[in-house]
Image (tube, grey):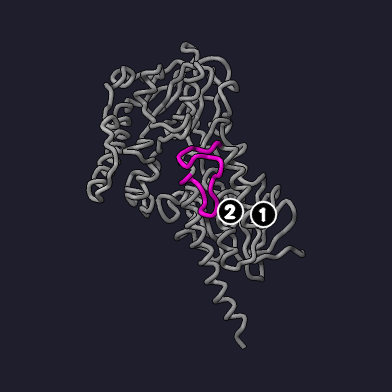
Amino acid sequence: MSSEKTEALVVGGGQAGIAASEHLTKCGVPHIVLEKGRIAEKWRSGRWDSLVANGPAWHDRLPGLTFDDVHPDGFPPKERMADYFEAYVDKFQVPMRTGVEVTEVRRAEGAPGFIATTSRGAIQADYIIAATGPFQKPVFPKIVADDAPALQMHSAAYKNPGQLPAGAVLVVGGGASGAQIADELLRDGRRVYLSVGPHSRYPRWYRGHDYCWWLGVLGQWDIEAPAPGTEHIAIAVSGAYGGYTVDYRGFAERGMTLLGLTEEYSDGVVRFAPDLAANMAEGDAAYVQMLDDADAYVERSGLDLPEDPDARAFGPPPDCVTNPLLGLDLAAEGVGTVLWATGYAPDYSWLKVDTFDDRGAPVHQRGVGQEAGVYFLGLPWLSRRGSSFIWGVWHDARYVAEHISTHRGYMAYHAGRP
């Protein structure tokens, strides 16, 4: 069977795939980028309508292009983010093909490299870069029965409050997505219950700088591995409404009912763990630790930054924390929707190669797969804490492209030997 040939095939046309293409071009590696939807499709159709970038415009971007119509400290809306990546593709002449789905990649039989089966025919490639990222399959815990008296929806399907049936909403998950959606629903006049598990939270601004800046100067974006037990801790931060610090106490003061971790369901009642106060305290500890680290850095560096005593002013715990609700009768409380903001999992079912562990997770070092010629980009903690962020994936892409370039050098020497 005849097939098109290229040296590197990049699967995924979002920020990871675009960054990979830029560095492959710089290294002189012929390549193709395939995207089954539009460029940066997830930004356009994969999230809710009011989503904005969680980092400011000066930070959440690739190095080769700035936002010319967004204040550096502003938070671009999702459509603007998608337009930004389209502009990046044009500027760097990324060899992108949209509307092409990769259904399978296998090692070529009797020949070097791989064969990718796509919706537009087969492509043979020496190197495969999986740049589809970690947010492919919504994680939807089967806790509440399908016949519960409420619509169940994952945050991936949520668009806006008008989409939901009448009644109160139970939002499960207190990370960035859950907190932002719960806040939007509360502002819309809904009665909202928010189930908050273990999490970390940070000040949106402190002493005149965004938390992204603080993590940078404190060296925390470059941490190479999460602290034990924190691998799956949600981060609560928001760029919505101009950006604000996620404060669950403030949510409660405005009428939101906070709940502990969602545990089980039976007879129309959702039950929660008695851990709300502990989860809140854990999030507060991370928040205060960052303030302490920032203050120490200011003193050590002799920076002239304004003090911010209000950042440490915590109000009293709300009643829903001191007297936690451990069970919620959905019908009796008029809950019309259970919205699961419980994250995503990667999907590499199309990649039929030997570089996954028993759980299906990629086995790699800094994105270099266990099987020669296979690479990954865009995953959390690929090489450092910032790997899954826009600017972080750009640095990881450079490493991957240079690794491919080095390997090409060895293969060229092999091919040129008499």
Q: What label sits on residue 96 in the rendered view?
A: 1
Task: Depth check: give the residue in front, 346 or 389.
Answer: 389
Q: Which residue is mark 2?
A: 17
Identified by mark 1, the residue type is: Met
Is 417 placed above or below 17 here? Answer: below
The three-letter amino acid code for the residue at tag 2 is: Gly
- The C terminus: image quadrant: bottom right
User: What residue is rendered at 61% in x and 83% in y?
Assistant: 416
Q: Is disc 2 in contact with disc 1, using a CB cutoff of under 8 Å?
A: yes
Name of the residue lying farthest toward the top: 332
Q: Secondary structure at mark 1?
A: strand
Expressed as whole percent of the image width and height from the top left, the position of residue 109 reads: 66, 67
Q: Main secondary structure of the magenta part?
A: loop
Let me know if residue 197 is in the magenta part. no
Relative placement, left or right, of 150 versus 319 is right
Q: Position of residue 234 (x, y in %)?
A: 40, 38
- Looking at the rendering, the stretch of residues picked out in magenta corresponds to 58-77
* Residue furthest to the bottom: 418
Name the residue furthest front.
304
Residue sitting at 48 percent across and 54 percent down? 357
The answer for how far apart the CA atoms under marks 2 and 1 are is 9 Å
Give the numbered dot on residue 54. Answer: none
Question: What residue is at 57 percent from the left and 35 percent from the top?
Answer: 47
Whether residue 139 is situated above or below residue 145 in the rendered picture: below
Quadrant placement of the N terminus = bottom right
Q: Residues within 10 Å of mark 2 (few under 14, many from 20)?
A: many
Element type where label 2 sits in the image: helix
